[in-house]
């Protein structure tokens, strides 16, 4: 036990003290926060692209909007199009916008733009929106309605889901619990992805480390002092501690940095909105009410249920894949390139589960979702993705028992393979040999 | 008293018998040579002795006790394929490996202080292993092997890759350890090293013990009653009847190699030569080298 502890310590300390670890750990949250902050900053401080257009309007409906802060300014001109095309630069415009006579109802109105440069997507969006707005207004007016009527035609539609619960006799027992399909989907994806990334990242770390010890031959020195299983377990536990440390630092830093950023920039929902008001975003009132709904739904999630289960799948999945990767690392030969194919043995199920996460979340009660979340090689990614959709208890329990049992089994299996593989130098092992090692005596 | 005793040890990998009924004893405090070509089963045997793998059958005693999982702490093993953590600092690495061998923190500090001073490498403590030269790494490897004061030291090809200066240094350390009572197993395929350093040997070929014993005894057993005679001047033209013991004449070196029939008197040869007017300068017995003995034994066993 003492020796296992020594190994865990070394595996942990050598990694945590590495410059690359410190850099990645400290920089990632900064990059993460920057990813969200920079676009807002750019929107806040960077000047918007503004175009000044001269408009030749054959439809006779266009009225230049008064808003000067918008993305494009329009100036109507009566000169012939050809003349405008030749002289727009001299008059200080960026280009010529041509609005033809209106087509019959139901057909597309095609505007033309003539210029040396191109319009950016946002300017194109702004211009077409403005023209469409005015055309609709004219059509409504021609049909004999007032503008107020048109505003009333616009209806926004959302759906609020309320979950019902029934007791065994089929009598309604609980109402009023808000659920949100969007939120459940988001929680599902995020949980699944976190576990996926952790399994791949730390699995590969363990595999590399085992291979390094094997190609270095240090392994022979070490297992003349400790059992191969102790070395393998020490590595798995040590790396898991590294992962936990990293996560903890990230969570803390993300929290601190984002509250700092929020405080510094005053970025509550409303103020983020105002500089983007020109971008056809919903009004800030509406945002606030949406945010309110999200928070309500977030608060109504059963975190006391989801979080511990997430942790359980996290740990179970980690042990299965960490030990599998250790066994693969131990079976590899000196030729790394040739050995890559072997690592697919451990990679394939994780990759498959991340590919199948979308259909599972889309249809969380399907047979595919059910069986994938019970099968232990997939369940660490798939079951957490389903948890927010509240799968039946028996499925969760069965899946947990399977996962716990398999974690023990895979650690045992990998220990058997590791023990033999790590001492065989040169060629990579075949799967057949690995099976043989599993059942061979020590 | 034996430090190590092997009885009928067998180890197979699939259909391949790497160790085939090997038995031998290693007396305490000797330098014991384990010889054999590459692939003979030496490393397999060592891995069994160091508890890295288990024998399929047979029994092993270390210092009178059946081999158990606490014994590795009493064994120092330097594998043929040297290995250290390349990115780890020398001091940290040695501390870690010493602790794994069961030394306490205090014992580790003392042992390291002793060896760092002895090898005059105090300034290496904070260097990473891959900043050291090959020879320097070998010194570190040697310290790893001996710092827990093992009763039994197993060195697999200890001189491979060493320059003459470091080889001498390590050889001196091995002799010093042997003088202080450490038993040493010295595994190699380079026979000439064995004759200089080992008291006892075992020859392993194809997983079998083909020969075992004290180096001097083995040489006596395999001597062919060959003698080298140096003479002055020249040999007489005609030496009637000398063919019965002459093997080789070398007039330029003034040397004769003769073989005396087992049980015959060497004085007969000398008397004969003196009677025929040969001026004797020297007379030596030619003992076979270990490598000659090895090749003969291997050919014999292959012949079987």
Image (cartoon, coloured by chain):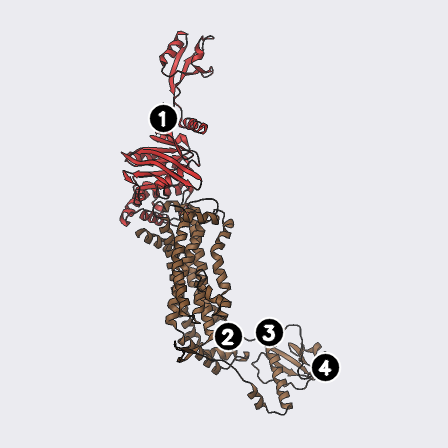
Given residues A295 and B130, the one toward you in this image is A295
The chain that appears red in the image is B
User: Residue A170: horizontal and vertical position, in percent?
Assistant: 41, 78
How much space separates mark 2 and mark 1, taking CA atoms?
A: 92 Å
The chain that appears brown in the image is A
Q: Quadrant of the C terminus of chain B?
A: top left
Q: Are marks 3 and 1 on the same chain?
A: no
Within the image, what quadrant is residue B169 found in? top left
Q: Are marks 4 and 3 on the same chain?
A: yes
- Look at 51% across and 63% down and name the residue there: A355
Give the class, few, some or many, for how many residues have Cα within 10 Å of label 3's Cα (few <14, many ≥20): few
Q: Which residue is mark 3?
A: A121
Choose mark 3 or mark 1, whichever is in front: 1
How much space separates mark 4 and mark 3, taking CA atoms?
A: 27 Å
Q: Which residue is mark 1?
A: B218
Q: Are marks 4 and 1 on the same chain?
A: no
Residue B138 sits above or below residue B202 on the image: below
Choose mark 2 or mark 1, whichever is in front: 1
Q: Which residue is mark 2?
A: A45
How much space separates mark 2 and mark 4, taking CA atoms?
A: 39 Å
Identify the mark nearer the N-term, 3 or 2: 2
């Amino acid at each position: 036990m003492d020796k296992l502890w020594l190994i865990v310590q070394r595996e942990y300390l050598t990694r945590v003290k590495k410059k690359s670890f410190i850099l990645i750990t400290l920089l990632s949250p900064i990059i993460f926060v920057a990813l969200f902050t920079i676009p807002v900053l750019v929107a806040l401080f960077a000047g918007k692209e503004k175009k000044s257009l001269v408009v030749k309007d054959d439809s006779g409906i266009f009225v230049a909007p008064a808003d000067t802060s918008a993305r494009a300014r329009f100036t109507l001109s009566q000169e012939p199009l050809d003349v405008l095309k030749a002289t727009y630069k001299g008059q200080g415009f960026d280009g010529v916008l041509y609005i033809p006579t209106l087509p019959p109802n139901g057909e597309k109105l095609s505007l033309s733009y003539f210029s040396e440069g191109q319009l950016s997507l946002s300017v194109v969006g702004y211009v077409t929106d403005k023209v469409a707005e005015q055309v609709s207004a004219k059509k409504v007016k021609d049909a004999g309605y007032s503008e107020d009527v048109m505003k009333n035609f616009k209806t926004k539609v959302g759906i609020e889901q309320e979950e019902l619960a029934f007791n065994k006799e089929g009598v309604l027992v609980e109402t009023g619990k808000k659920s949100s399909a969007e939120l459940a989907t988001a929680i599902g994806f995020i949980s699944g992805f976190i576990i996926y990334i952790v399994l791949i990242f730390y699995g590969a770390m363990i595999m590399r480390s085992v291979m390094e010890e094997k190609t270095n031959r240090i392994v022979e020195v070490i297992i003349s002092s400790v059992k191969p299983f102790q070395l393998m377990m020490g590595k798995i536990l040590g790396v898991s501690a590294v992962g936990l440390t990293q996560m903890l630092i990230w969570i803390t830093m993300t929290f601190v940095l984002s509250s700092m950023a929020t405080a510094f920039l005053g970025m509550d929902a409303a103020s983020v909105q105002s500089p983007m008001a020109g971008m056809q975003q919903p009004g800030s009132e509406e945002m606030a009410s949406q945010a309110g709904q999200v928070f309500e739904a977030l608060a109504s999630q059963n975190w006391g249920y989801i979080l511990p289960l997430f942790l359980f799948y996290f740990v179970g999945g980690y042990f299965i894949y960490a030990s599998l990767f250790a066994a693969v690392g131990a079976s590899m030969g000196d030729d790394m390139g040739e050995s890559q194919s072997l690592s697919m043995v451990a990679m394939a199920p994780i990759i498959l589960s991340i590919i199948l996460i979308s259909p599972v979340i889309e249809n969380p009660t399907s047979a595919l979702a059910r069986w994938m979340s019970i099968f232990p090689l997939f369940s660490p990614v798939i079951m957490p993705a389903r948890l927010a959709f509240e799968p039946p208890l028996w499925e969760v329990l069965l899946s947990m028992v399977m996962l716990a049992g398999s974690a023990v089994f895979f650690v045992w299996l990998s220990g058997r393979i590791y023990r033999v593989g790590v001492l065989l130098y040169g060629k990579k092992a075949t799967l057949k040999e690995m099976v043989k090692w599993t059942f061979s005596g020590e | 008293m034996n430090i190590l005793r092997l009885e009928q040890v067998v180890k197979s990998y699939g259909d391949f018998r790497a160790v085939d009924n090997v038995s031998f004893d290693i007396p305490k405090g000797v330098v014991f040579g384990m010889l054999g070509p590459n692939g003979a089963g030496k490393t397999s045997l060592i891995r069994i002795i160091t508890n890295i793998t288990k024998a399929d059958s047979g029994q092993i005693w270390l210092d009178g006790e059946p081999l158990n999982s606490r014994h590795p702490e009493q064994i120092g093993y330097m594998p043929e394929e040297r290995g250290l953590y390349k990115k780890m600092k020398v001091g940290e690495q040695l501390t870690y490996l010493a602790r794994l061998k069961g030394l306490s923190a205090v014992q580790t500090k003392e042992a390291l202080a002793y060896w760092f001073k002895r090898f005059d490498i105090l300034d290496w403590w904070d260097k990473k292993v891959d900043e050291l030269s090959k020879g320097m790494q070998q010194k570190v490897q040697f310290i790893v092997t001996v710092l827990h004061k093992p009763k039994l030291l197993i060195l697999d090809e200890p001189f491979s890759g060493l320059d003459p200066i470091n080889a001498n240094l390590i050889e001196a350390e091995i002799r010093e350890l042997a003088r202080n009572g450490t038993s040493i197993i010295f595994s190699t395929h380079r026979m000439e090293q064995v004759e200089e350093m080992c008291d006892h040997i075992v020859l392993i070929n194809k997983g079998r013990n083909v020969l075992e014993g004290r180096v001097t005894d083995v040489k006596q057993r395999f001597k062919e009653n060959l003698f080298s005679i140096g003479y002055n001047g020249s040999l007489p033209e005609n030496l009637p009847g000398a063919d019965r013991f002459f093997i080789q004449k070398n007039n330029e070196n003034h040397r004769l190699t003769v073989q005396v029939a087992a049980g015959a008197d060497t004085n007969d040869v000398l008397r004969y030569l003196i009677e025929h007017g040969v001026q004797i300068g020297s007379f030596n017995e030619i003992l076979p080298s270990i490598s000659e003995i090895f090749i003969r034994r291997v050919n014999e066993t292959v012949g079987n």
